[in-house]
Amino acid sequence: MKPDNTEPRIWLGLEIKQLADDLVCHQQLELDELLQGLGLSADEFADPAIRLSLHQELSLYVRIANLNCDPYLALKHGLRQTLKDFGILGVAMMSATSLGDAWRVAVRHSRLLSYSGRFRLLEQDGQLSLLMQPAPTDAVTSVFEAESCFAMLLAVSAELVADTVRCHRISFTHTVSEAYQQHWAEQLGCEVRYGQPDNMLCLSAADSLRAIPFAHPEYSQYMNELCENRIKALQTESGVAARVESLLRQHEGKITLPETAAKLSLSPRTLRRRLALQGSSFQALLDQVRFERARHLLLTTQLTVATIGLQLGYRDVANFRAAFRRWAGVTPKAYRQQPSE
């Protein structure tokens, strides 16, 4: 569905613009084909001042991932990113005193890395492990986002310490060919595992303590405040649908429309109307979050289909099976058994 004209707009992200240019300039993809279904013309997209709805930007990212013909584009794109491409987040990371602290800053303000992706940091004996759950899209886009994000973090980490950074280990949930795995290992100079429970980037204790040569810790608080302000601005710009989606994720889909409306200081009727103006609905967003959670549990746990359905709020497993088939086109059992992308 084409977004309503009343949906708030945000500036087109530089990362997405670079990826679009790669497909058009190097893969000879017609720009009109890339923009199909987004309600944008080629002339509008070429405008430096273009502003998109969050729905349009995410849809464009999905089309880029699915139309891409270069299996290594995510890796190449990530490795060519610099701190300036991270904007205010890059400056905030530069204000940290160590590489580990810079990673903590990145995770604290992770919405500036990926508005819909989820990040968390585990610390044990000084080693840092960054876990990422991509935005709730299709399998191809999820793989592309995870690979691109990890490559970006490694690139800017090297820039921060003015030296090569080789992670202790990198893990991905998807599976690949042996040649693909070898290419990644050669490019990054570290162990890369596939078919693992989580997308995870591990930094050794020694590397996490590496000093940032030109750190400005006196600016740290100010830069972090700027990041927080930018995130608040994004929440406002992205509209009520993004805020509803965020609340649904926080509560793993176990929150009702009236409860959600109350948290947003809105009446249920007003919330329904505002979502409709953005071409969305509470049920559509709930389905999206449930599908994301269901896929994760099916691929990373041995829980039965009935148990997963209960965790998602379905008391009748038949209803969960029917909903999942509607989302994925296959049953939960078939989805779990199919080969990974």
Image (cartoon, rainbow, N blue to C red):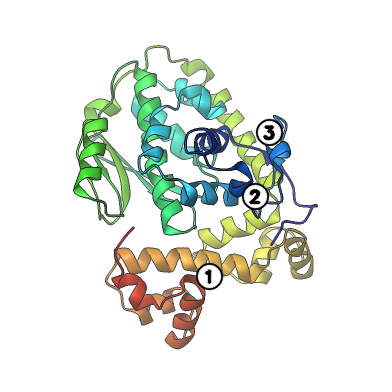
- CA–CA distance between discs 3 and 2? 15 Å
Q: Earlier in the sequence, mark 1 or mark 2?
A: 2
Q: Which residue is mark 2?
A: 56
Q: Which residue is mark 3?
A: 46
Say which of 200 and 144 sits in front: 144
User: Which residue: 32% across, 65% down?
Assistant: 299
Say which of 118 and 4 sits in front: 4
- Quadrant into which the N terminus falls: bottom right
User: Which residue: 47% across, 52% down?
Assistant: 66
- Quadrant into which the C terminus falls: bottom left
Q: Farthest residue toward the top?
A: 214
Q: Amino acid at mark 2?
A: Gln
Q: Amino acid at mark 3?
A: Ala
Observer-side mark, 3 or 2, equals 3
Give above or below for 178 relative to 213: below
- CA–CA distance between discs 1 and 3? 42 Å
Q: Which of the 4 image quarters holds residue 284? A: bottom right
Give above or below for 200 relative to 87: below
Say which of 184 and 36 sits in front: 36
Q: Is residue 302 left or right of residue 295?
A: left
Tell me where residue 202 appears, x and y as whole percent.
27, 39
Q: Secondary structure at mark 1?
A: loop
Q: Are marks 1 and 2 in contact (CB under 8 Å)?
A: no
Say which of 222 and 166 sits in front: 166
Q: Which residue is mark 1?
A: 254
Q: Earlier in the sequence, mark 1 or mark 3?
A: 3
- CA–CA distance between discs 1 and 2? 27 Å
Tell me where residue 241 appears, x and y as whole percent.
66, 57
